[in-house]
Image (spheres, coloured by chain):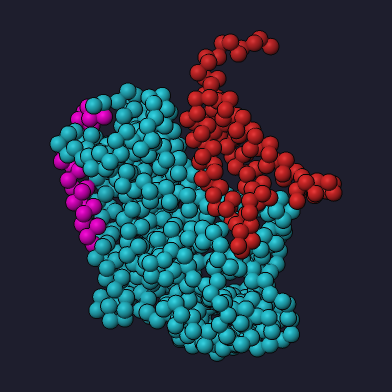
Chain colours: A cyan, B red
Amino acid sequence: MIHLDKDETKAMVAVHGWSGICLGLLLYAVVLTGTAAVFAQEIGAWAAGHLNSQSAFEAPVDARVRRLSEATPAQYRDSLNLFEVGDHGLGAFFHRDALDAKGMPTERGIYYQLDHGGRLTSTVHGTSEEVFGPHNDDALSSFLVDTHVRLHVPNPWGLLLTGVLGLTMLVAAISGLLIHRHLFKDIFTLRRNGSPVLANRDMHSVAGTWSLPFAFVLAFTGSFFSFYGTIGVPVVAMAAFRGDVQALSEAVYGNPRKSDPRPASIGDLDRVTADAVRRTGEAPTFISIEHFGRADAEITSYHQPKSGDLEPVALLYNGATGAFERAKPTVGTRPSAGGTLSGIMGPLHFGNFAGILSKAIWFGLGFAMCYVTYTGMRLWVVRRGQDTRALAWLERTLTVVGFGLPICLLAAAAAFLVTMPLGSAVYWTTGGFLIAAGSVIATGVVIRSNEALTRTLKGTAGLIMIALPLLRLFAAQGPGWSEAIASGRPMTPAIDVGCILMGLWLVRAGWNAARPAHRDGTVIGKGVRA
Amino acid sequence: MPDRSNTIPSHLRFSWVRFLLAGPGAIAVTLALLAGMPLWLPAGAAGIDNLVFPLVLAPLIWAALFFHACLDRNLMRVAVIAGALLLVHGGLIAARLLPHPVAHEISR
């Protein structure tokens, strides 16, 4: 425990409160969408009705890649990235290094999408920023991730904004730790017999204390990812490489090897993927081929961390022969402290290092962070609201954002389920979110009582959640539970059940909030002053 | 111009200096450290530690500077530490970027 004197504690309380109240609403949006994005892949598969459970890399890829390479102009055959898209389909991006209009390094080429059966479904030409946009069947998961990563603000400003929010969360987490005088006592203190606000303050404190390490890790890793490309890399390259970002990237990620530009056929990719699966126990998440079609070609296969480990695995193969060369760190050419440190940042942030279990823990703790962020702002407002009514607008805004944002996300999911079969999900997923946002704001203006507004928004969120499984089944023509389980997709019925239970709980909570005891503002005020 | 420094309450002036050190000051020093640390940190086994550590630790460096500026009673000490870090790393960066051959020798 760190013991601060009275003045220092007061300063930390001010830092904690103001850091939350200045950027808390945006932080809440980022944390809420990040919580949902933990399961973005599963939510995307649930909504799009995916049924394949075999990885694209466990199906034959060699013949498909050779067929695509023959159709690709030689100028784009320098490098190839392979990864999974949609319902375990294959994405293949043939490209070469290039500079964009602003002179920044990028990749330009042709992006092919194949379905699980190997049929070509899409071909897009352009830079990496242009070709990797949302598609009809992944519009919902893309929308969730994009909201979390940059709040739909154009880059680099969106990333800078979420980076600042990450630092705000870091400040709130550290100051939250410093202001606890009795940390271990606070972890277990829940005075349920006191006033409602005293109970709320205890719950904020308990949820915040339990999730403090998690908040710290998320804020640290999140701000790292946001600032990495926007500020970090250019600034580090400024002195170390005289501003040459490409040289920095080559030093950190490159595989230095003697150049041999002689033409050579690429090695058997099926043999490479089979060997990678045998060595790591699971299919690759990503395969990168440098100098495709040359004698010095190199294939790197990337995998999730092994069981009980945090650092992702990468295997290096000779591109011309397909022979295994060595396991390598994801960053750097050989194991190092820096490579390990940067390698674990992703798994720590995404919570994907131990499958569904770690994701579930990250989801739960993310939800706790949403609760802490929202209740923290609410306590701040209610405490000051006793002295002046000028903060009533802020209390109303808190309710609109706190309960309205989940409604908007649920409406986006509903819009996706209705419009995906029509092929217009990319447009209407965002459209559904915006229409819901407008409706929620209008409701916030029209309904005079904050309690009635809360009740209405909770009930609406609950009803949409209950409707989602029905929309999935009947509007999106998604698979039934038995079909999904038989296809190795147990998450589909699990998400359905989760939606229904959560929806019922929200409807019940909205109903309970209508009871007179919950509407007594005087009790809340007394509780806060206590 | 009338001298208004005496009319500003001391705690307010105190707060503004602290605000500047914790806000723009912490950001400026973090950026200087981010650019300057690769020039003196050991490169490690893979030759990348000096590049990766500043990149990864930048949020924590900023947080350390921010909380130091918020909590240290002695504002002069905060200013001296931040100023020293800024000057040393600014000097290293300048030495690296200046075209003068002597500067290159220094940076090595």
Identify the residue at horizontal 72%, vertical 56% (top origin).
A241
- Asked if A322 appears above or below A449 in the picture, the reply is below
Q: Is residue A453 left or right of residue B25?
A: left
* Quadrant occupied by the N terminus of chain A: top left
Residue A287 in sight here:
no
Task: Answer with the quarter of the image where residue A97 lies.
Answer: bottom right
Q: Is residue B54 left or right of residue A427?
A: right
Q: Is residue A133 left or right of residue A429?
A: right
For the residue pair A210 and A375, the one nearer the viewer reads as A210
- Asked if A306 appears above or below B17 in the picture, the reply is below
Identify the residue at horizontal 29%, vertical 35% (top origin).
A182
Task: Answer with the quarter of the image where residue A253 lies.
Answer: bottom right
Q: Position of residue A17 (x, y in %)?
A: 40, 34
Instruction: Give the number of callouts.
Output: 0
- Asked if A367 appears above or below A62 in the picture, the reply is above
For the residue pair A478 and A195, the one nearer the viewer reads as A195
Q: Position of residue A508 (x, y in %)?
A: 18, 51
Q: Is residue A409 left or right of residue A515?
A: right
Magenta-colored segment: predominant secondary structure:
helix
Magenta extent: A500-528
- Asked if A118 appears above or below A5 in the picture, the reply is below
For the residue pair B55 and A133, the one nearer the viewer reads as B55
* Quadrant occupied by the C terminus of chain A: top left
Identify the residue at horizontal 59%, vertical 39% (top origin).
B27
Residue B67 in sight here:
yes
Q: Position of residue B64 (x, y in %)?
A: 51, 39
Q: Is residue A451 located in the magenta-colored stretch of the structure?
A: no
Identify the residue at horizontal 69%, vertical 83% (top origin).
A294
Q: Position of residue A264 (x, y in %)?
A: 68, 87
For the residue pair A411 and A347, the one nearer the viewer reads as A347
